[in-house]
Structure formats: C-alpha cells, structure tokens
Image: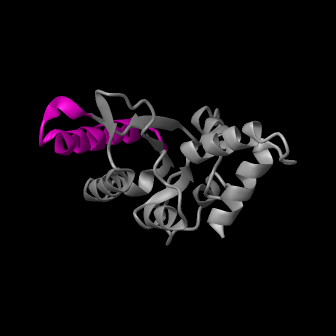
Amino acid sequence: GSDVNIFDVTPDHAKKLRIQNPIISNEDLDKIKFIEHENFSASSVTALYDVRSGNNGLEHALDALLLDVKKKVEAGSNIIILSDRGLSNEKAPIPMLLACAHVHHGMMNHRLRSNFGIIIESAEPREPHHFALLFGYGASAINPYMVNEIIDNLVHSQGRIQITTDQAIENFNKAIAK
C-alpha cells in the first residue's frame, strides 16, 4: 500500500496490507490481485516486450512500462503487480530486476513512489540472491510462479512423497525468506 509522512502520526499509517512472508504463493497473489477493500486497489502491469522491435525494443518497453504504472497509480492503484506471464515467441520478458528498478527509480523521479507497493510475479527468481536483489531494488513481495509450478509438478509426479503441494510451496517460501 501507500506510505504516508512519517512525521505526522495519523490513522493512515495503519492502512497497510500485512503479509506473513514476502515470498508469496500463486494463491496468495490471487488474493491480492482481486482484493476488494476500500483502502487497497491492485493493478497488474505486463513486463514483456516485442522481440521483433529491434535493438531499442527493450528501452521502449521500459518507457511504456513506466508510463503504464504511472497511469495506474494516478488512477488510484496502490499495489502494482509487475508480471512476466504471457511470454511467447513474439513476446520476451523484460529482466525483472531491470523492470523493478526502472519502475522504482522512475516513480521516485515522478514523486509517486511512496503511493504504491511493488509485487513481482515472475518466473525468474529461484535462488535467495535473486530475491534479495529484487527486494533491494524496491519489491515489497515476490511470487516465483515458475518455482511454484515446478514444485507442484514434482509433488504430483513422485507418488512416494508424503507432502502436499501447498506444504512444499510453503516450505520453499519460508526457506527463501529466512
């Protein structure tokens, strides 16, 4: 959610969406995406670019991403989900660390960064270092959807594993958070 002036103590300081772990499952991300609360509004922004756009395609995509985030924040969204879902032969993902950093610093330049939190929905982060960098560059929470899908596949393909998919994903998320 939004941050407010730390020098004024007001009830607005308590208007934050609190999560137990900043590494969130697909299910938890869906709860945030479709939140219905007067103090919170979530919007997804696609972090993909057209691979046929040439050498400057990535640069133009970053500019378009920042403009899209700016419009959504100005329209009242206080949770922005940067997503690389939907890639194809024509659409490649913007490296998520680059996308996160560009949005974080670009919105600081527009003096809007304190108005929203960034959630990452990406197939990229797998190792603790990936997560640490994303948090360092402005992410508030991360959904490593590809890892969740790999864990789900492993649990279902190994008949002898005595753990549910939800437990396995929770274990992974706890381990990364620690």
Specify the principal SS of the magenta part: helix
x 49%, y 45%: residue: 123
Where is 94 relative to 22, above or below?
A: above
x 62%, y 40%: residue: 149
The foreground one among 15 and 132 is 132
* Extreme-left residue of the structure: 55
The foreground one among 129 and 139 is 129
Task: Give coordinates of residue 97: x percent, y percent.
Answer: 37, 56
Is 59 on the left-hand or right-hand side of 30? left
Task: Give coordinates of residue 174: x percent, y percent.
Answer: 70, 62
x 12%, y 36%: residue: 54
53 falls in the magenta region: yes
Magenta stretch, residue numbers: 50-79
Displayed quadrant of residue 101: bottom left
Displayed quadrant of residue 105: bottom left
On the question of residue 9 being in view, the answer is yes
On the question of residue 20 being in view, the answer is no
Is 102 on the left-hand or right-hand side of 171? left
62 falls in the magenta region: yes
Quarter the C terminus occupies: bottom right
The foreground one among 118 and 112 is 118
x 67%, y 38%: residue: 153
Task: Give coordinates of residue 159: x percent, y percent.
Answer: 82, 39
Where is 123 relative to 174, above or below?
A: above
Is 166 on the left-hand or right-hand side of 86? right
